[in-house]
Image (cartoon, grey):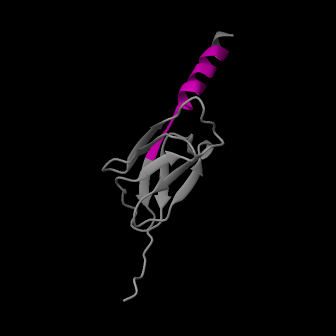
Amino acid sequence: MLAIAIGLTQLAIAQSAVSGRVINSQSREAVPYVSIGIENKATGTVSNIKGEFFLKLRADISSADSVIFSSIGYKTVKHSIADLQKPDNEVFIVPQTYSLEE
């Protein structure tokens, strides 16, 4: 019984945040200052200079919710929280270029 209680406590702690690193899919370099937020929820963060992020999850957020990664010059990427429950997440974002007409 004690082992079950300890296991459930660890599961709850493990699911209370998602973390990882945002990487440019072409250059394989870290992408700093990426906006990261839970879709339709008022919670989010920004990746640091090394592309690393840590996003604490509130009680009203479930594994079915989506995390959105966006940055100027890159296509927006969406992942479910369930997909980000592993310890060493690498989120790849794709550079996006625009042509301007004269």
Magenta run includes residue 87: no
Q: Position of residue 13 (x, y in %)?
A: 54, 26
Quarter residue 30 falls in: bottom left
At 46% from the left edge and 64% from the top edge, which residue is drawn? 25
Residue 99 percent coordinates (x, y): 42, 82
Q: Is residue 98 above or below residue 9?
A: below
Q: Which residues are magenta?
A: 4-20
- Say which quadrant the C terminus sits in: bottom left
Query: Is 79 left or right of 4, judged from the image as shown?
Result: left
Q: Between residue 20 and residue 75, name the one nearer to us.
A: 75
Q: Quadrant of the N terminus?
A: top right
Magenta: main secondary structure equals helix
Tell me what residue is drawn at x 66 percent, y 42 percent.
64
Is 46 left or right of 76, judged from the image as shown?
Answer: left
Q: State the residue at coordinates (56%, 54%).
A: 78
Q: Is residue 14 magenta?
A: yes
Return the residue found at the far left.
49
Residue 12, by quadrant, is: top right
For this orientation, the residue located farthest to the bottom is 102
